[in-house]
Structures are given as structure tokens and as C-alpha cells.
């Protein structure tokens, strides 16, 4: 077995144990949230995400496993919010700052830009962008979930399209929230 296969099996086992721990936590059996185990699992996922030169089978398993872990993490976050009584709202109340010159509909949350030359070779950057997208969706209260594989193919297609159309070397992406919607903006470099 390769190092990636070993790590995939470890993450699968850790995820199974963490599911059991969270079920006990939300069921009231255990009073403490299993944050240490969750953090350890996320560190292993980060290592797997940054691995390069995976075999096709390992790449497929890694993508599916990363998506599964992300789904469970989002579900646990929603359950925590419900347990604490702070349900995420799909509709946010907008307040107008009289000193701010821009109307509220034009305001956007600050975003981090990621520049890619070839997304198929820069998996770590695509993962960072995906995590930012998932985080922003949670902040916006969106229930839409996109798999990592679908997100990665979208990024690849958009990069190829902009590089060909504008004869660019690279493409910059940023995830922003505008009018309570999560948008993925791209710009050729």
C-alpha cells in the first residue's frame, strides 16, 4: 500500500469514530464536543489534499473522502448552531450605514484571491478555494453543497476558457458574498 492509500484508510476510520463521537455528543451521552479528534482529522485531510502524484484510484477516493468529510463538518456545524439556539438564517437583515456611500446591495464581503496557472497541477490552491467557497456558503446560510470534483472541474474549465480567450498566463479567482449570494469571480492575469 502506498502512503496515500494508508492515509485514506486512516481518515476513513477516524471519520467513522468521529461520527460515533458526534452522535453521542448530540444525543447527550457525552457532554464535551470531540473537537480534538475533529482537528486531528482535518489535519490528516489537509495532508491528503496536498499530496501530489496520486494514482487515479487514489485521486478518486481522496476527492470523494474529502467531500464526505466536508459534508459531515458542515452538518455538525449546523447541528451545533441549532443546539446553541443560533440557527443560521437564509435571509439576513441589512442595515444601512448613513456614513457609507455605497448602497447595501453593492457591498461585498472581503475575499482572498487565489491565482492558478494550471488547476490540475495546483490541487492545494484549488482546495483552498473550495474551502473558502464552503465557508462563505455557511456564512451566507446557503444549503447548497457542491462536490469537490464538480468544483474542481468548474475551476479547470473557467481557467482554460479565460486563458484561451485572453491569452493569459494565469487566472485569479475569489469567492465573495454579494446580496447574500456566494459568487466565484475570475479574472485573467
Image: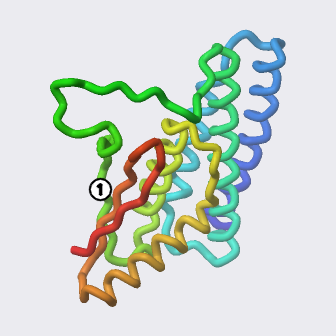
Reading the image, the residue beneath label 1 is 113
Q: Residue at x 47, y 50 (%)?
A: 182
Instruction: Please tell me which residue lies in front, 85 or 75.
Output: 85
Circle 1: element type = strand
- Vertical placement of residue 52 versus 118, above or below: above
In the image, farthest residue toward the top: 31
Instruction: Please tell me which residue lies in front, 110 or 72.
Output: 110
Residue 70, image x and y in percent?
62, 46
Q: Residue at x 49, y 55 (%)?
A: 130
**Left or right: residue 112 compared with residue 11:** left
Number of disc labels: 1
**Left or right: residue 33 compared with residue 182:** right
Residue 151, located in which quarter of the rendered image?
A: bottom right
Residue 42, image x and y in percent?
56, 41
- Vertical placement of residue 16 versus 82, above or below: below
**Left or right: residue 97 compared with residue 38:** left
Q: Residue at x 64, y 52 (%)?
A: 145
Amino acid at each position: 500500500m502506498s502512503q496515500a492509500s494508508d492515509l485514506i484508510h486512516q481518515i476513513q476510520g477516524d471519520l467513522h469514530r468521529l461520527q460515533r463521537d458526534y452522535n453521542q455528543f448530540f444525543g447527550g451521552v457525552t457532554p464535551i464536543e470531540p473537537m480534538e479528534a475533529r482537528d486531528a482529522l482535518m489535519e490528516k485531510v489537509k495532508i491528503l489534499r496536498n499530496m501530489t502524484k496520486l494514482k487515479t484510484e487514489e485521486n478518486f477516493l481522496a476527492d470523494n473522502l474529502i467531500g464526505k468529510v466536508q459534508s459531515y463538518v458542515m452538518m455538525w456545524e449546523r447541528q451545533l448552531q441549532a443546539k446553541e439556539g443560533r440557527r443560521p438564517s437564509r435571509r439576513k437583515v441589512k442595515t444601512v450605514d448613513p456614513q457609507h456611500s455605497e448602497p447595501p446591495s453593492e457591498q461585498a464581503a472581503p475575499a482572498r484571491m487565489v491565482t492558478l496557472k494550471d488547476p490540475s497541477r495546483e490541487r492545494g490552491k484549488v482546495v483552498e478555494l473550495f474551502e473558502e467557497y464552503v465557508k462563505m456558503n455557511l456564512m451566507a446560510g446557503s444549503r447548497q453543497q457542491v462536490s469537490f470534483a464538480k468544483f474542481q472541474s468548474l475551476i479547470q474549465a473557467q481557467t482554460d476558457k479565460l486563458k484561451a480567450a485572453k491569452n493569459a498566463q494565469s487566472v485569479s479567482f475569489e469567492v465573495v458574498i454579494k446580496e447574500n449570494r456566494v459568487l466565484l469571480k475570475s479574472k485573467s492575469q
